[in-house]
Image: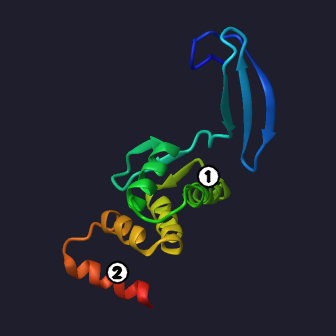
Amino acid sequence: MKCPYCHKDDTKVVDKRDLEDSTRRRRECLNCKKRFTTYEKIELLNLSIVKKNNNRESYSRNKLITGFKKACEKRPIKQEDLENAIDWVENKLKAINKKEIPSVKIGELVMQKLKALDKVAYIRFASVYKEFKDIDDFKKELKEIKK
């Protein structure tokens, strides 16, 4: 592991903790003696996302995080709740147990989680995902939420 301070390769692990879905390692650089933390997380391997136009791209957790963060921007949502929501979606994707997953499925899972987490964030995401054309689309979706 390369030290983020002096960029040398000589580090040692001084503490390791297994978390629910990752491993946290506290490291110390043997050169500059500074400490830093790394996280080791299992990746979804060989997962392709089938887009609406039938193009395929590799799964990216960062894209999922970006979508959630845009929807939840300036909303009173704890970082921990946001991370749990992202992990929940990933766990659902793992449970599908297929190499190709339609992007529509990911969008549905994100909307399901956002609806439970924050209604405003849900509407923000839905307006882009469902390609709202005008105010009537918003009204229709708001009526659905109120049910």
Left or right of 134 in this view: 38: right
Dot 1: within a 10 Å radius of its alpha carbon, few (fewer than 14), some, or many (20 or more) residues?
few
Picture layout, residue 122 above or below residue 84? below
Residue beneath the point at 45% across and 91% down: 147
Please tell me the numbered disc located at residue 7.
Answer: none
Give the residue pinned by disc 1.
Answer: 98
Picture coordinates of residue 145 (x, y %)? Answer: 42, 84
Q: Is residue 60 left or right of residue 29?
A: left
Instruction: Measure the alpha-carbon separation of dots 2 and 1.
Output: 31 Å
Q: Secondary structure at mark 2?
A: helix
Question: At 57% from the left edge and 20% from the top edge, which residue is drawn?
Answer: 4
Residue sitting at x 74%, y 39%: 23
* Residue 67 quadrant: bottom left
Q: Secondary structure at mark 1?
A: loop
The label shown at residue 141 is 2
Viewer-proximal residue among 21 and 101 = 21
The image quadrant where one finds the N terminus is top right
Q: Earlier in the sequence, mark 2 or mark 1?
A: 1
Q: Position of residue 90 (x, y in %)?
A: 60, 54
- Residue 82 vs residue 20: left or right? left
Residue 124 visible? The answer is yes
